[in-house]
Image (tube, rainbow, N blue to C red):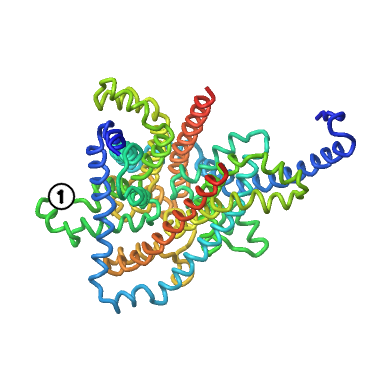
Amino acid sequence: MKKKHKKRNILPGFGLSMGITTLYISLFILIPLSMVFIESSKLGWSEFWQVVTNERMMHAYKISFATSFAAALLNGIFGFIIAWVLVRYRFPGKRLIDGLIDLPFALPTAVAGIALTTLYAQDGWLGQYFMAIGIKISFTPLGIMIALMFIGLPFVVRMVQPVLENLEREVEEAASSLGATKQQTFLKVIFPEVLPALLAGFSLAFARGLGEYGSVVFIAGNMPMKTEIAPLMIMTKLEQFDYAGATAIAVVMLLVSFICLIFINLLQKWSRKHELQDE
Amino acid sequence: MTVDVSKYGENRMQYVTHKKKQVNWTKRILVTVMLLYLSLFLLVPLVFIFTKAFEQGAAVYFAAITERDALSAVKLTLLVAIITVPLNTIFGVAAAWCITKFQFRGKQLLLSLIELPFAVSPVIAGLVFVLFFSPRGVLGPLLTDWGIKVIFSVPGIIIATMFVTLPFVARELIPVMQAQGSAEEEAAISLGANGWQMFFRVTLPTIKWGLLYGMILCNARAIGEFGAVSVVSGRIRGMTNTMPLHVEILYNEYQFSAAFAFASLMSLLAFLTLIVKSWIEWRTEKEQQV
């Protein structure tokens, strides 16, 4: 016990680093975010409820949830395929593609927004082909989904990739030498191993999609009751100087993100447990 | 491919070649799916930005990026990045140091708090600072008395960007420092080095790539942040207009070529980020192999 205590104290800088960390977190995260809850308490309960559940708002939540969910789901499927291809196969240009995956993290969202909007517009490079088969993308919920798919693409790939890399080939070889078919090996050996990371990537993409503003605001068209997303409603209220209303919506969205965050943490714990069991 | 027949026997060899053929088919399909998906979402948009930017010729392009408001947007964005990146680097190093080298209660909570800005919508990030600093906000009257303007002004933009980019450096450093352990630092201290000597001669060389990685990601986000900044900026041309906001203004004014010209400039910055990032990954891989 005494030894442990001594060991803990030999490195310097705990006070300084802890001080800086708490200072930053209080100044930039805790105090500002607590403002949301203080400001919204200025509204009475019934008024708060009315702001966050009025018809236009309900439409906005619906659009936000549906598009984020669909985008995260598609990214889950294709992200898994991309991670699989990048880990398992060799092909020319692999390094380049691997580097390109992170583009949505590096490209400003506004740039992505205007590019996707013009591309998928009715007369755009890609939009005209979809229009020919009767699908309108820009300025519809479908467009919002496209923008969110762009934004969320790296999350699933980057969560699944390291897990696939660390997967031991011996386990698969054992499965196949014990008579498992390829499908069985995939479904019963590989997939359960990757599932926590896949779900964590899905939730990260979903959470990011719910809050995303920059890329969506251009492609959405922002028509009330049709293509308005929840973050845009905060923006609209702010422009009308309705701070209390904006804050009420922010409270709802913050609660949803906290739930997502808790879920992601649990998944990561589960994923780590998986790894420990293997060792 | 050569198969050692003597080892496997006839049946086994058939099985192996059969399997090989199938793998090739799945590979071909999966690689095609990936390339299609990535072209649709990454490659085509990128090519499109540059094509659109040069649509009306190089003269229009250069006029768009050297115009007075454009230059002031570039200047403001660089100022924001120059201030936020070092400040967040200090935070990232401090946070990673106390989290990875010491045991204390509430560590998990602290980790979650550091990641919080990633889960919060950028619009909400802007909103909280409006609630705090605007004339009708908590500190508003005080700031008005002192004659300090935060919202619709440069300090507000910097503060909102700080919030959004806070986790980047810490997030990259924590796993690196965790993997490193603290044996080397403990040795330095017991051999009589002081805290700063230990940090600059032992810690910093081992974390330099992780640190640089976090900093360029932080920088990319600081330059590109749109939602939070657009809430607090007020979009005053030539004064509180950052690069992404300038793109938005041009686009909304139907000056598409100019908007895409400016956007292509930011895409080049994004490319640069990706290249440095890949280079760092390549370096660390190489160092690990040695």
Location of residue B280 with respect to B125 vertically, above or below: above
Location of residue A62 with respect to B154 vertically, above or below: below
Comparing A146 with B211, the one in front is B211
Looking at the rendered structure, the kind of residue marked 1 is Ile
Provide residue A209's location: percent of width, then percent of height: 47, 57
Q: In the image, what residue occupies the spot 34% across and 24% down?
A: B202
Q: Where on the picture, by quarter, is residue A253?
A: bottom left
Comparing A88 with B217, the one in front is A88
Residue that extends furthest to the top in the rendered view of this protein: B191
Location of residue B49 with respect to B133 vertically, above or below: above
Residue that extends furthest to the bottom in the rendered view of this protein: A46
Provide residue A75's location: percent of width, then percent of height: 57, 53
Q: Going by the image, does A248 lie left or right of A206? A: left
Residue that extends furthest to the front in the rendered view of this protein: A1
Provide residue B135's location: percent of width, then percent of height: 18, 59
Provide residue A150's location: percent of width, then percent of height: 53, 51
Q: In the image, what residue occupies the spot 36% across and 31% down?
A: B182
Quadrant containing the N terminus of chain B is top right
Residue that extends furthest to the left in the rendered view of this protein: B145
Q: What residue sits right under mark 1 in the picture?
A: B148
Q: Going by the image, does B98 lie left or right of A119? A: left
